[in-house]
Amino acid sequence: MKGFILSFRSEFYKTRKTAGFWSAVILPLLLCLLLFIGFYSHSDKLAGLPGIMLWVQFSGAILGVMGSLLLPMLIVFIAYSVNGIEHKADTWKTLFSLPISKLSVYSAKFFYALFLVLLCLALFVLFTLGFGNLLGVLKPQLKFSEYSMASTLTQLYLKLFLSSLGILSIQFLLSLLFRDFLKPMGIGFVATITGVILASNKWTYAYLFPYSHPMLALSVLPKRHDPTPVASGMPTITIDLFTKEIFVSLIVAAVVFIAGYFIVLKKSVK
């Protein structure tokens, strides 16, 4: 465990000034800010909507883009950025010769990439809620305060995160095996487009293809509106978190992670 913590901390210091790290921070801020400006400038047209519909439109605009193209391509970039430093400096042999187990080094890199994805999605939740509530303050006619979206939005982004684990494990392994960025990027891009086509056409077995998982995870948003009113008089939105694509994503992530360790272990001692 000590070796893992040291390796994880090392990954942070090596990447904290890279585009891969800052993309996980700037992307949520930029997209939510642009959406905030759009809603602010068109507030008169949105003034008649109830709070729940305002939140659905505000958060759904970002979730739709993230679930289809943006998240898979961000994962491609993050996965390579974590390993690209070692490729560019040609320090793989040095890294694996340290008095730290190869499993600790490998798992620390993987979980650091996972941490960056989680950080990005967590910031999307915070910025979406923050800018939405700010709109309600600056434009009182926008009734964001009528409905609380915090719990629902957290569940949605958690589901999106779980759906991305299969893609992350595959792209992480590809970024370990290939020195240049074009190969993992090209494979990831083609696979993402394929996943979007399969999911958008509602192919029966699309859930077996990892790159379809983010879009499938959000394809039924909201899952249903509970007709029973709550204390505030507004309906609730129920999210089915563990659907079949989520289970497949978790299985793919575990299998590829284990297989990747043995592949890299063999490769590292050549």
Image (spheres, helix red, strand yellow):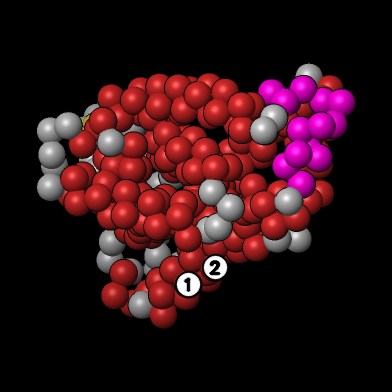
Q: Position of residue 98 (x, y in %)?
A: 85, 31
For the point 50% across and 24% down, the residue is 259
Q: Residues within 10 Å of mark 1 (few under 14, many from 20)?
A: few
- Residue 184 appears in view: yes
- Which region of the structure is painted magenta? 91-104
Instruction: Name the amino acid, label 1.
Output: Leu
Cα distance in 3D space between marks 2 and 1: 6 Å
- Residue 52 appears in view: no
At numbered mark 1, what does the secondary structure look like: helix, strand or loop? helix
As drawn, 157 above or below 16: above
Foreground pick, 18 / 25: 18
Q: Position of residue 66 (x, y in %)?
A: 40, 54
As drawn, 13 above or below 88: above
Contact, CB < 8 Å: mark 2 with mark 1? yes
- Residue at the farthest top position: 1
- Residue at the farthest bottom position: 41
At numbered mark 2, what does the secondary structure look like: helix, strand or loop? helix
Is 46 colored magenta in this rendering?
A: no
Give me the disc on residue 34. 1
As drawn, 120 above or below 243: below
For the point 46% across and 51% down, the residue is 184
Q: Position of residue 34 (x, y in %)?
A: 48, 72
Q: Position of residue 9 (x, y in %)?
A: 80, 39
Q: Which residue is mark 2?
A: 30
Position of the C terminus by quadrant = top right
Whether residue 180 sits left or right of residue 11 in the image: it is left
Instruction: Name the amino acid, label 2.
Output: Leu
Q: Residues within 10 Å of mark 2 (few under 14, many from 20)?
A: some
For the point 31% across and 54% down, the residue is 190
As drawn, 175 above or below 208: below
